[in-house]
Amino acid sequence: MDLLLLLFSAIWYILPAYVANAVPCILGGGRPVDLGKNFFDGNRIIGNGVTYRGTFFGILFGIITGILQHFIVILYMDPQSVFNYGLTGYIILGFLLGTGALFGDMLGSFIKRRLKLNQGQSAPLLDQMTFIVFALIFAYPLYQQPVNLMVILLVISPIIHFSSNIIAYKLHLKKVWW
């Protein structure tokens, strides 16, 4: 598989996770998942940045992305391609990748609170990698991908995450650029 096709395949596969991870910045807010509670160390469990609404819409848009991918495959790509998981498959994949991404983001927030980092403080690689690693873990039992595709995702995701954060910051969707 040539590098360009591998790159496209990797982004196509993980797209529901990227969308699910981005949507809470736009549609989040409201009640935090940790309900404002503190952990044993006296710090918030997760913090105000992870909310029920953001989690719901993140997962929902992960699923919607999967559905859109299905129709793109049917309309514009070879339906016999490796990208054709079928409608049900794309719904499940969107759910798994979206849920995994948001779980990873929550875990990252949990770890940041244990490290006494405030919401919005940068934690290089932790901010960029937990969502992608857990998206891959959640989807893996049903959708195993080649190792080279997963390695590509681990390499490009911090770059994509960083770039999208800068764009979100410039659009006033985020308070910090990282």
Image (cartoon, rainbow, N blue to C red):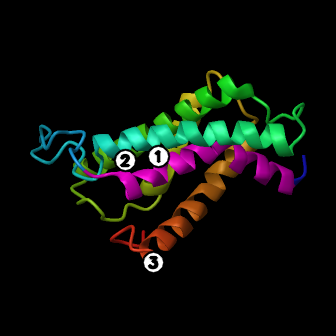
Other residues around mark 1 within 10 Å, as few (<14) / some (14–19) / many (≥20)? many
Q: Would you say residue 36 sits in the magenta stretch?
A: no
Other residues around mark 2 within 10 Å, as few (<14) / some (14–19) / many (≥20)? many
Other residues around mark 3 within 10 Å, as few (<14) / some (14–19) / many (≥20)? few
Residue 114 horizontal side relative to residue 72, left or right:
left
For badge 3, the amino acid type reads Lys
Marks 2 and 1, how far apart in space? 6 Å
Marks 2 and 3, how far apart in space? 24 Å
Q: Earlier in the sequence, mark 2 or mark 3?
A: 2
Position in image of residue 16 (x %, y %): 59, 43
Residue 90 horizontal side relative to residue 113, left or right:
right
Marks 1 and 3, how far apart in space? 24 Å
Q: Which residue is mark 2?
A: 108
Residue shown at the point (35%, 46%) measured from the top left: 54
Residue shown at the point (39%, 57%) measured from the top left: 25
Residue shown at the point (79%, 36%) measured from the top left: 83
The quadrant where residue 41 appears? top left
Q: Circle 1 sits in a helix, a strand or a loop, which is it?
A: helix
For badge 2, the amino acid type reads Gly
The residues colored magenta run 3-29
Up/down of 56 relative to 10, above or below: above
Residue shown at the point (55%, 69%) measured from the top left: 163
For badge 1, the amino acid type reads Thr
Q: Earlier in the sequence, mark 2 or mark 1?
A: 2
Q: Which residue is mark 1?
A: 130
Q: Earlier in the sequence, mark 1 or mark 3?
A: 1
Q: Which residue is mark 3?
A: 170
